[in-house]
Amino acid sequence: MPQEYRRIEVPLGARSYSVRIGPGVRHTLPEVVAGLGAARVVIVSARPRDWVPDPGVPALTLEAKDGEDDKTLSTVEELCRRFAEFGLTRTDAVVSCGGGTTTDSVGLAAALYHRGVPVIHLPTSLLAQVDASVGGKTAVNLPQGKNLVGAYWQPKAVLCDTDYLETLPPREWLNGYGEIARCHFIGAGDLRGLSTHEQIAASVALKASVVAADERDAGMRHILNYGHTLGHAVERATGYAVRHGEGVAIGTVFAGRLAGALGRIDAARAAEHHAVVASYSLPTALPPGLAPDVLIALMRLDKKATTGLSFVLDGPRGPELVHDVPEHEVAGVLAAMGAAAPRDHRTSTADTKGAS
């Protein structure tokens, strides 16, 4: 059992839960399962079987794949079929073990099966630990865009075992740092120079406070999408050759430049966006060959774009959702970001084999 770990509460009344962060916290899984009173569980894992401890009750283990290609409704349907074959009831539980795409797909399957069964997340990537596993947003992709079909379904617990991170290849570290870098501009403060454990805790604490205040995106939760509108478009336009965190990093630089072009922030604040993202060795420019009109068309499919183009942008009152941003301003900023230096797009074209 872990000797010490950080515990952060996500206060949502009857749906409240804790996020445990530290080495070895996966070994608290039997305690969590017992606390739920579950008689059995289905474990859906994109990692080796020995990465998930014995939950203490009869369990079915299903193999999963981490990757946007498998983040689909057909994956969710197959999971639900396997739940039914196992005889899972709404008094039992589902456990996810993997990166952000596994967390999302399993979370949505748990939300839909029997109209909702308890789910426990064991995120194994930095990206999943700082973002995807917390907050209750679950979604899968359609050919038309990313995360277009989903539901809100809060987990019963999140176990962020930092031992998992020891296996990550360099590009997966960058993938997580994309989400950490954007936290700089939405209230977490400067996380550069902190330990990974502290960066995870600060990111989770920020997200917990925002989700507690706005669970279903009625207001301030939009700030968590900082950098994501362009980021999702870049992912889609490159066939997901650009990873999520890399796309968010590019989107964060774009958000700073767009806010500056609109007169919402001064030049120094806009430049700070580039400096912070670059300090994590993340890409800061668009990969070659992405036309502004293609990206703009994809951004019009964004869930926030209820009227015209919408972005979460910094400003005098801090980050906020801005609707009806003029297309010519967006196109101008995108065009200026199109000439990527080798250092800027290196991670976008790196080999993804072995990515967690």
Image: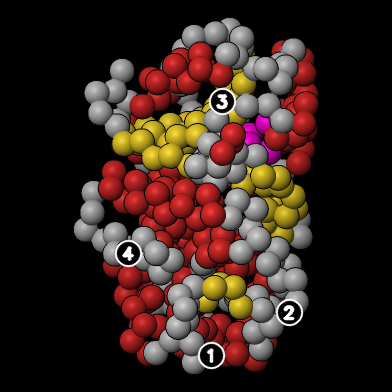
Which of 353/278 is in front?
278
Which of 78/113 is in front?
113
Looking at numbered disc 1 in the image, what kind of residue is underneath it? Answer: Leu
Mark closest to the chain's N terminus, 3 or 2: 3
Is residue 253 visible from the viewing direction of this image?
A: yes
- In three-dimensional space, the C-alpha distance between marks 3 and 2, rounded to whole angstroms, equals 39 Å
Q: Quadrant of the N terminus?
A: top left
For disc 1, the marked residue is 262
- In three-dimensional space, the C-alpha distance between marks 3 and 1, rounded to whole angstroms, equals 45 Å
> Which color scheme did the rendering employ for the protein?
secondary structure
- In three-dimensional space, the C-alpha distance between marks 4 and 3, rounded to whole angstroms, equals 32 Å
The kind of secondary structure element at disc 2 is loop
For disc 4, the marked residue is 189
> Where is residue 126 drawn, in percent x and y?
40, 45
* Mark 4 nearby-residue class (10 Å; few <14, some 14–19, many ≥20): some
Q: Nearer the viewer, mark 4 or mark 3?
A: 4
Q: Which residues are magenta?
A: 105-110
| 10 sits to left or right of 327 | left
Mark closest to the chain's N terminus, 2 or 4: 4
The kind of secondary structure element at disc 1 is loop
Report if the CB atoms under discs 1 and 2 are less than 8 Å apart.
no
Mark closest to the chain's N terminus, 3 or 1: 3
* Quadrant in which residue 112 is drawn: top right
Residue 317 is marked as none
Which of 290/163 is in front?
163
* 135 in the magenta segment: no
For disc 3, the marked residue is 95
For disc 2, the marked residue is 308
